[in-house]
Image (cartoon, rainbow, N blue to C red):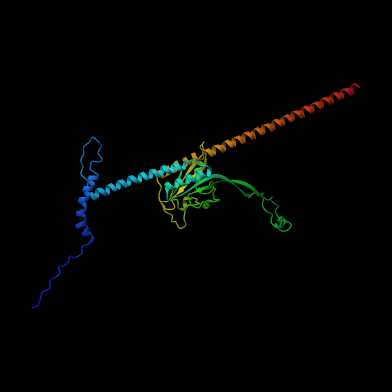
Amino acid sequence: MVSEEPTTPRQPLPVTAAEYLSEKVYPTLEPALEAMLQAAFPADAHVPEGEEEKGVLDAPLVWLAKYLKDRNTENSAKRDRDTWQTALELAGSEADSYQSAYDHGVAAARSVLWPCSVIIAIKDTVTEQVPATPREPEPKPEGEEEEPAAAEEGEEGEEKKPEMKDVSVPVLRYVATSHPDKRSIEGWVLRYEEQGRTGSVVASAETLVVERAAHREQNLHFFCGRAKGVTADDAACYCAVPLKEQDGSVYGVLAMDTLLDGRMIGEQDVERLQQLAAAVDRAREPFAAADREKRRLEEEAAEAARLEEEEKKRLEEEAAAAEAAAEEGEGAEGGADDKGN
């Protein structure tokens, strides 16, 4: 007689994650989550006092997703407002020098508009030597051979150097940058009347916005902000805002570009850059006012010295005229005495 061994009950096949969620997790989670949400966030919590309104909540997970999205949007907006307010305060904060005011402005613009490159450039002049206008050679009679060039050379056969003259060239000198290494703009100047389009900002005192800034046909001139290998993205933008003295004259530009990420800037970005430029103007005004006062005193001193010199010269001329008249009178008296004798 063969004994029968007890058979092991068959184990069910393992379920997938989706099946487990639908069969086990959701039925357990949803009632508990719904009860918790209804207790913590009643449907009519948003209804003002005095009004009775009972709404029906969405499915718990849908309601939670909407709630978290709204909270995220609200927090992002608050974070943006706080960042902007901090940047505006930084740009207009008290500075201890011109350079400090410019650095604050660049840092503020970078914190609000990042990713971007920001610079401040100030009007200046550089002296360059250029050849003086050469004299046109005198026409020679027909048939006469021209003298060899060696005749105009020095005794040792060296060519005669052309006469040079100094000329002043207006430029924009880069003084502040968002680049971590400030040496990236050291010595850089832009001949804005000849190169690029930023000169229109200086001439018109109006904001310049250029789209598709990375394309060559836009004729823009950059000194920082464009990394090697960055493709010419259609969305990349360039914006330059004039920096103004108290009387409205332009002394420089605050400019930014989005060549780092190739994004398009909007009206809000332009308006914020304009407000930051105005804050930089206010921050540097004490130093500009001190310089204006210094120039005024120097001009008054120079004018006083000029008037004093003119008065001195006038007195000397009057004294010389009086002396000449006296000598002439003495000569006339001497002639009369000789005639009487």
Q: Image height check: is 309 above or below 37?
A: above
Q: Image height check: is 85 above or below 142?
A: above
Q: Is residue 18 visible?
A: yes
The picture places residue 144, in percent across and down from the top left corner, at: 72, 55
Residue 267 in which image quadrant: top left
Residue 3 in which image quadrant: bottom left
* Name of the residue lying farthest toward the left: 1
Residue 309 in which image quadrant: top right
For this view, does 301 lie left or right of residue 70? Answer: right
The picture places residue 59, in percent across and down from the top left corner, at: 22, 49
**Is 157 or 98 nearer to us in this picture?**
98
Q: Image height check: is 284 above or below 235?
A: above
* Quarter in which the N terminus is drawn: bottom left
The picture places residue 239, in percent across and down from the top left corner, at: 45, 46
**Is 207 or 15 nearer to us in this picture?**
15
* Name of the residue lying farthest toward the right: 341
